[in-house]
Image (tube, helix red, strand yellow):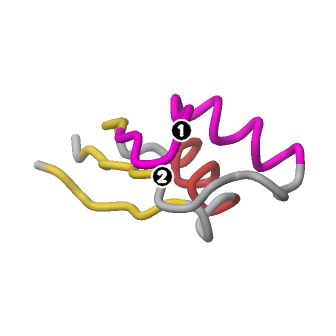
Amino acid sequence: MARLKVTQVKSYIGSKQNHRDTLRSLGLKRLNDVVVKEDRPEIRGMVHTVRHLVTVEEVD
């Protein structure tokens, strides 16, 4: 199964509470944090919610 490397590139200060909660659920706590998650529809939806705050790369 493919994996996604999610990096937080922008601060969540000034964002909606929903976006902050989504970043926390992904495991991102501060700027430049990186997590690797399984490529599942749930994770894709969470990344889509905060797409303006993160970058995503596919990892094999």
For residue 39, side relative to residue 60 (left or right): right
Q: Which residues are magenta?
A: 17-34
Residue 45 location (% of width, % of height)? 62, 53
Q: Which percent across, then down, holds residue 37?
A: 36, 36
Q: Which residue is mark 1?
A: 30
Name of the residue lying farthest toward the bottom: 52
Residue 14's x, y, as percent? Answer: 84, 58
Q: Residues within 10 Å of mark 2 (few under 14, many from 20)?
A: many
Residue 39 location, quadrant: top left
Q: Where does the N terminus fall, quadrant-wise?
A: top left
Numbered disc total: 2
- The residue lying toward the viewer, choosing from 55 and 10, is 10
Precedes in sequence: disc 1 or disc 2: 2
Q: Amino acid at mark 2?
A: Gln
| Separation of residues labelled 1 and 2 (CA atoms) | 7 Å
| Vertical position of residue 41 compared to residue 48: above or below | above
Mark 1: amino acid: Arg
Q: Is residue 26 magenta?
A: yes
The structure residue drawn at horizontal position 63% and vertical position 49%, both measured from the top left corner, is 46
Which residue lies under the disc numbered 2? Answer: 8
Q: Is residue 28 above or below residue 49?
A: above
* Residue shown at the point (32%, 49%) measured from the top left: 4
Residue drawn where x is 65% and y is 59% of the image: 50
- Does the residue at mark 1 contact the one at mark 2 (Cβ under 8 Å)? yes
- In the image, residue 40 sits, relative to residue 26, either above or below, namely below
